[in-house]
Amino acid sequence: MRFATPHALIFLVIIQAVCAAFFAADLIADFKETADMTTTHWHLYIESIATLSLVGSIMFETRVLMDLLRRKAHLEASVSVATSAMHDVIESHFDRWRLTLSERDVATFLVKGFGIAEIAALRGNAEGTIKSHLNAIYRKSGTHNRAELLSLIIDGLMVRGRIENNQTAA
């Protein structure tokens, strides 16, 4: 089962807490009723263990949920940093290659994986115009096709990652 937000899980924990409170109140009432009796009531002991187990499970669930929410926030922040770094590397390549605004736009769509027809439709251009931009991009970047261009950009990302790792290690 997958939840889009933690609200559903929080709601379930609250329901469980209400149930645990009900069972605890019932257990206390049962103990008061049988306090003056001298016989052993195994049913009450089993009910006590079940209620305490439910309370322990709720505490454990809450702890796990909080840990998961913290981890999710950390991962989202990491993705944001990585996205920003990737954008910076791509933009630095575009600057170094001196791409025009139209070429940058086409190159960005190319990096995102769009085909020539899709780029043309998104930009409202003819496919021939997009091919012309692609030829200029390949010429300026020193590549011959999409695979070489993407390889060059990925190499730039890897080099930047190694440089940043070396700087943080020092």
Image (cartoon, rainbow, N blue to C red):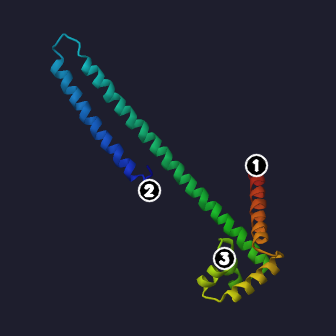
Disc 2 marks a residue whose amino acid type is: Ala
2 vs 99: above or below: above
The residue pinned by badge 3 equals 115
Answer with mark 1 or mark 2, whichever residue precedes in sequence.
Answer: 2
The residue pinned by badge 1 equals 169
The residue pinned by badge 2 equals 4
Residue occupying the point 64% across, 81% down: 117
90 vs 129: above or below: above
Mark 3 or 2: the one toward you: 3
* Residue 65 location (% of width, % of height): 45, 44
Disc 3 marks a residue whose amino acid type is: Gly
Other residues around mark 1 within 10 Å, as few (<14) / some (14–19) / many (≥20): few
- Image position of 120 (left or right of 8): right
* Residue 124 location (% of width, % of height): 60, 88
- Tag of residue 34: none
Residue occupying the point 22% across, 26% down: 28
> Please, what secondary structure does the residue beneath circle 2 have?
loop
The furthest residue to the top? 38
Answer with mark 1 or mark 3, whichever residue precedes in sequence.
Answer: 3
Mark 1 or 2: the one toward you: 2
CA gap, disc 3 to disc 2?
A: 32 Å
CA gap, disc 1 to disc 2?
A: 37 Å
* Residue 167 location (% of width, % of height): 77, 54
Disc 1 marks a residue whose amino acid type is: Ala
- Residues 136 and 87: in front is 136
* Residue 88 location (% of width, % of height): 69, 69
